[in-house]
Amino acid sequence: MKRISTLIAVIILGCSAAMAQTFTLKSNDLGGQFVNDQLWNQMGYHGKNVSPQLSWENAPAGTQSFAVAMYDVDAPTGSGFWHWVVYNIPADVKDLKAGAGDLSRHLLPAGTVNGINDAGAPGYIGPAPLPGLPHQYLITVYALKTKLELEKNAPAAYVGVFLNLNLLAKASIVAYSQHP
């Protein structure tokens, strides 16, 4: 009888683990390719430079804050290009509105930091790939075990080190853009 009880307990635990939800990032604004609203308004582009709407669900237990980063994997720099990093998003926040990367719009929750992108400014700068092959942009939400205590002028790559050191889980979306 004890063996049957143990077997039933193992089956129930296994089913519970199989039904656990995964940490997921979604966007109502992105469907595989960036549109003009999200493109930068520099380097020959006439975009609106609006950061996309993002939402996430099923963060792991113990999450103390979130961060979001957008990175161009294919930028011709030899090291990619950070378009946006925002961190210390409170743990009870589950989404960012479109345009949250624009500091003048004040759409981020209190205490959230819009980090320094690779153009040297805080906030979002949209895709503006040079002519050639399409660029792959990795947008990632990070569930963190703490808030980050960093200087507000810390560059995105430096922030990235601390995102990974304090990581509980991450989820990503890939979107593409190509010069017309």
Image (spheres, rainbow, N blue to C red):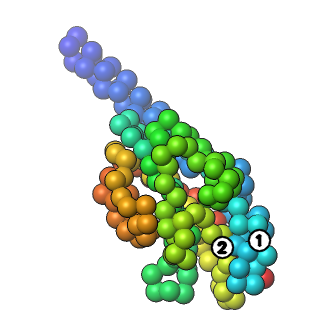
Instruction: Tell me the CA gap for discs 1 and 2.
Output: 9 Å
* Circle 2 residue: 127
Dot 1: within a 10 Å radius of its alpha carbon, few (fewer than 14), some, or many (20 or more) residues?
Answer: some
| Image point (50%, 35%), residue name | 92
**41, above or below 11, in the image:** below
| Image point (75%, 84%), residue name | 44
Residue 128 horizontal side relative to residue 158, left or right: right
Dot 2: within a 10 Å radius of its alpha carbon, few (fewer than 14), some, or many (20 or more) residues?
Answer: many
Chain-order first, disc 1 or disc 2? 1
- Which quadrant of the view contains residue 35? bottom right
Position of residue 83 measured from the top left corner of the image (x, y, whole percent): 56, 70
Residue type of the residue flagged with mark 2: Pro
Residue 6 horizontal side relative to residue 85, left or right: left
Q: Are marks 1 and 2 in contact (CB under 8 Å)?
A: yes
**Looking at the rendering, in which quadrant would you find the C terminus?**
bottom right
Position of residue 117 measured from the top left corner of the image (x, y, whole percent): 52, 70
Residue type of the residue flagged with mark 1: Gly
Element at label 1: loop
Task: Say which mark, if any, is on residue 94.
Answer: none
- Residue farthest toward the left in the current orientation of the protein: 2
Element at label 2: loop
| Image point (27%, 16%), residue name | 4
| Image point (53%, 39%), residue name | 93
Position of residue 171 measured from the top left corner of the image (x, y, whole percent): 49, 53
Q: Is residue 174 visible?
A: no
| Foreground tag (1 vs 2) | 1
Residue 48 horizontal side relative to residue 168, left or right: right
Q: Is residue 180 visible?
A: yes
- Residue farthest toward the front in the current orientation of the protein: 104
**90, above or below 126, in the image:** above
* Circle 1 residue: 47
